[in-house]
Amino acid sequence: MSKAILVLLEMPEKCLRCDFGFDQGDTAYCSRLEKSVERTDHRSGCCPLRLMPKKEPPTIMNDEYDDGYVTGWNRCIDQIERRTE
């Protein structure tokens, strides 16, 4: 199965503010986890959402492998961010 990335413009602070969360009284239902999670003032520890990774600072190394890794990593982040604008 192919992998996919879903980019949310803002990370929700708690499950009920998430596009995938639904109020069930004392709990919230997460459609991504397909189960009920406890209602709290923060996201559940089992939340599948992750923060967008940061760009790596440029390196000044003699190792071409490390330089190429950083360049590739930053280009990938640029491509993801460009598609969300």
Image (cartoon, grey):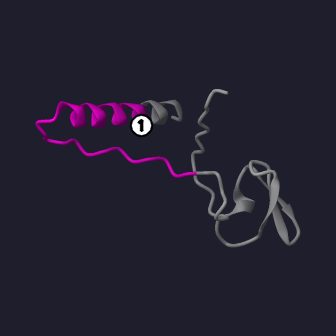
Q: Quadrant of residue 9?
A: top right
Check if residue 35 falls in the magenta segment. no
Check if residue 58 falls in the magenta segment. yes
**Crowd tier of the residue under label 1, counting other residues whose Cα lies within 10 Å: few below 14, some 14–19, many 20 or above:** some
Q: Residue furthest top?
A: 2
Placement of 27 over or under 3, stated as above or below? below
Q: Secondary structure at mark 1?
A: helix
Q: Which residues are magenta?
A: 50-78
Identity of the residue drawn at 58% across and 54% down: 11
Q: Total number of numbered labels?
A: 1
Q: Is residue 70 left or right of residue 25?
A: left
Q: Quadrant of residue 37?
A: bottom right
Q: Which residue is mark 1?
A: 77
Q: Is residue 50 left or right of residue 27?
A: left
Placement of 83 over or under 24, stated as above or below? above
Instruction: Estimate the x, y position of residue 43 in percent, counting from the top left.
Output: 65, 64
